[in-house]
Amino acid sequence: MDCPKCNGEMNERKFRTLEGLVLFDQCSMCKGFWFDNGEAEKLKDAYEPDFIDSGDPETGKEFNKIRDIDCPRCGDRMELVNDEKQRHIQLEVCRAHGVYMDAGEFRDFKNETVMDAFRGVAAFIRGE
């Protein structure tokens, strides 16, 4: 599978959680991630998986500017979606297959802060 952002090779990686093994893909070049449906959530709840996101967040911010990408599984155009709890995180999603996260986004996704919770409440109140 090729990276939907930089066309680099996506390599399968593994992380063992209490619930079992989680497989996901990481780009060898830009260090972005492809998570099949449910994989990111399993890793988010796991103990200390932060180290898997070894990419440079600044590189991730540059690649995050690329918005029109296709799902690496089916080729359909992916949707830009804000994370429900951390509205400042914008992810590319294929509802049928999974989610793409740029380098640094998984670390941010994993580490929800009090400020993130406040932002989520404020966005809910504003109707966003």
Image: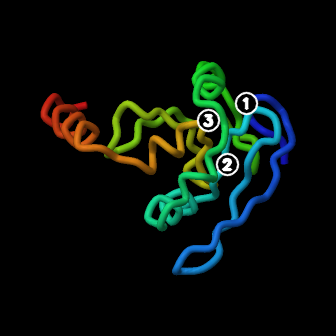
Residue 19 at what x, y percent from top left?
53, 80
- x then y, percent, for residue 30: 74, 32
Residue under label 1, please give it.
5
Name the residue tied to disc 2: 34
Name the residue: 67% across, 48% down: 34
**Would you identify the image quadrant in which residue 8 lies?**
top right
Instruction: Please say if the residues under marks 3 and 1 sit with CB atoms less than 8 Å apart.
Output: yes
Q: Nearer the viewer, mark 3 or mark 2?
A: 3
SS for dot 2: strand
Residue drawn at (51%, 66%) of the image: 42
As shown in the figure, which amino acid type bears the numbered disc 2? Trp
In the picture, which quadrant includes the C terminus? Answer: top left
Look at 23% across and 34% down and name the residue there: 119
Give SS at disc 3: loop
Residue hosting label 3 = 102
Separation of residues labelled 3 and 1 (CA atoms): 9 Å
Secondary element type, mark 1: loop
